[in-house]
Image (cartoon, rainbow, N blue to C red):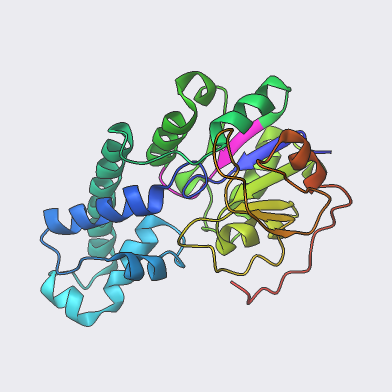
Amino acid sequence: MVTALVFDCDGVLADTERYGHLPAFNATFEHFDLPVRWDEQEYGRRLAIGGGKERLASLFADPGFTRSAGVPDDEGGRRDLLARWHRDKTARFTELVASGSVPARPGVARLIGEALSAGWTVAVASTSAEASVRAVLTHAVGDELAQRIPVFAGDVVPAKKPDPAIYLLAVEQLGLEPADVLVVEDSRNGLLAATRAGLPCLVTVNGYTRDEDFSEAVLVVSELGDPGRPDVEVLAARGSARPSGLVTLEDLRACTSGHTAPDIDEGAA
């Protein structure tokens, strides 16, 4: 039975990709006079790459970009340049979150508050920068609740999602039993990370991820829902959970009823 929830951050706690990360990347590009801007379609493609630094590093694959931007040829020089870009982008992102420009996703604060009140463990596991994750968490649930939630983020693991390392670390450090844990994700990479760690996963889609393959998820919904909002759309239900109107703690408990870890095609990412 579920007694622990582990949330991803971006796209789960708040609508960070469209309203936070994308404008922050483009502001960084402008600040450094880089010959690139990402529109929503291009950024959607870049989301297949796990991690902000890794998305920035993908620019190095374009010889025209590296020439125009004066990117050094040596690995050390590129690593230092990438670190400067990423620090700037992270600062701009956290400013956007603090300003209230990034909307929290429906149902997150409600369910986290209810879970903590019920004595559940609640954590956040993301391979985004820790400063960004903590800013989003505080914005989504408030400072009081955020202080009660452990965060596993950034470079605490050597590989980004869909590698399961961040979830394996969270389970180990928190002393959790995998059978008692439910992960809340929004993307296929996140779903694969959870299932490869042997953890059942609920997916709450967003505009960038709605059409991805979530075959291994125990429940796929449009959002978690809140009173007064339109009913949650259930896109797939493979466990016992059948949300009506909004996702409840009872629905989360039902997600793991009879759960067995699915077989994962390692090339499916």
Residue 123 horizontal/vertical position (percent): 60, 35
Residue 130 horizontal/vertical position (percent): 43, 40
Residue 219 horizontal/vertical position (percent): 71, 54
What range of the chain is rendered magenta? 122-129
Pick whichever, 129 or 137, lies toward us: 137
Quadrant location of residue 171?
top right
Q: Relative to residue 240, is residue 59 depicted above or below?
A: below
Residue at 57% over, 22% down: 148
Q: Relative to residue 75, is residue 253 depicted above or below?
A: above
Residue at 69% over, 30% down: 121
Quadrant location of residue 40?
bottom left
Residue 63 falls within the magenta-colored stretch: no
Q: Is residue 178 left or right of residue 121?
A: right
Q: How many callouts does the rendering have?
A: 0
Residue at 57% over, 28% down: 149
Q: Is residue 27 left or right of residue 129?
A: left
Residue 169 horizontal/vertical position (percent): 63, 44
Pick whichever, 157 or 202, lies toward us: 202
Residue 127 falls within the magenta-colored stretch: yes
Quadrant location of residue 217?
bottom right
Classify the position of the C terminus by image quarter: bottom right
Classify the position of the N terminus by image quarter: top right
Pick whichever, 143 or 231, lies toward us: 231
- The residue furthest right is 258
Residue at 49% over, 28% down: 141
Pick whichever, 10 or 178, lies toward us: 10
Q: Is residue 161 left or right of residue 182?
A: left
